Amino acid sequence: MFNKNLKYKFSALLIAVLVSAAGFYGCGDSVAPGQGENLSFSVMSNNDSIGDAQNYFVLDTVKILIKDIKLNVSGNSENLKNFKVGPFVLFLNLSSGLNLIGTSIIPPGTYDKVKFEVHKLQDIEEIPDPEFADANGRYSVIVKGWYYDKYFIYKSTKSAHQILHFPADLPVSGSVFQNITLVVSPYIWFIRDFAYMDPTDPANSNDIDNNIKDNIKNNFKSFKDNDKNGIPD
């Protein structure tokens, strides 16, 4: 369990992270769309799986490198429309609030799914955030937090192509601005057999990385969310 000094340290760090998260996206989802833009993407963290009343395991930073967000025209798997190319950093707001990924112009039509890639940087690619590359390699996911009284930084090299089907087809026009929310569940990346793994133990790296990849494939959710409350409209 955390001692008092550690709790104070964590509280200060958490406040700093939340302030920096707001700064990373400027004004967050309050940013007004540009001329002609008709679609925005937002992201939020699902913390329902924390299950840790004693605060033995607490995340304070989750960053995911993604690229090539595309929308698929309904009923035509070969007809994809670019939303944002990247690669760029998706920064989760761990207070369960929404952060803006970006806004863009999408051709009017009806869309049934979104595709993107969780991406490990290649050697020739520009580094959008210095934490995604170091002397040991390049990474796709950066997670920071506390495991008992130990502060950890976990870096994953896993990549995954993601296809998310919308619960209902998304109509996009040139006159109505729509928002899509992407929900990510980072805490379950570190759970095995209903208990949290120690991220600082190299013996757990393979299980954590596989959890990240499996979660990306099976547990990311995306839906129309124009009121930006994290619930499908």
Image (cartoon, rainbow, N blue to C red):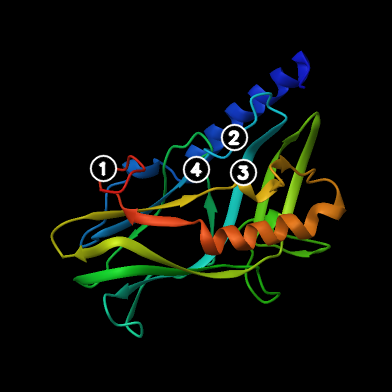
Neighbourhood count class around disc 4 (C-alpha, 10 Å): few under 14, some 14–19, many 20 upward: many
> Is there a contact, CB below 8 Å, between mark 2 and mark 4?
no
Q: Residue pushed farthest bottom?
A: 78
Image quarter of residue 112: bottom left
Q: CA distance from mark 3 to mark 4?
A: 8 Å
Q: Are marks 3 and 4 in contact (CB under 8 Å)?
A: no
Mark whose residue sits in front, 2 or 4:
4
Q: Mark 2 = which residue?
A: 17
Q: Does residue 180 lie above or below 15 as drawn?
A: below
Q: Is residue 86 visible?
A: no
Residue drawn 65% across the image and 69% down it: 121
Q: Nearer the viewer, mark 3 or mark 2?
A: 3
Give, as a three-letter code, the residue at label 1.
Asp
For image coordinates 22% across by 59% down, the residue present is: 35
Residue at image mark 1: 227
Residue placed under numbered mark 4 in the picture:
46
Q: For numbered disc 1, what is the local secondary structure?
A: loop
| Of marks 3 and 1, the one in the foreground | 3
Going by the image, does 27 lie left or right of 118?
left
- Give the CA distance from mark 1 to mark 4: 17 Å
How much space separates mark 2 and mark 4, taking CA atoms? Answer: 17 Å
Q: Which mark is residue 148?
A: none
Dot 1 or dot 4: first in sequence order is: 4
Q: CA distance from mark 3 to mark 1?
A: 26 Å
Whether residue 41 appears in this view of the structure is yes
Secondary structure under tag 3 reads helix
Percent of width and height locating residue 79: 32, 83
| Disc number for residue 187 | 3
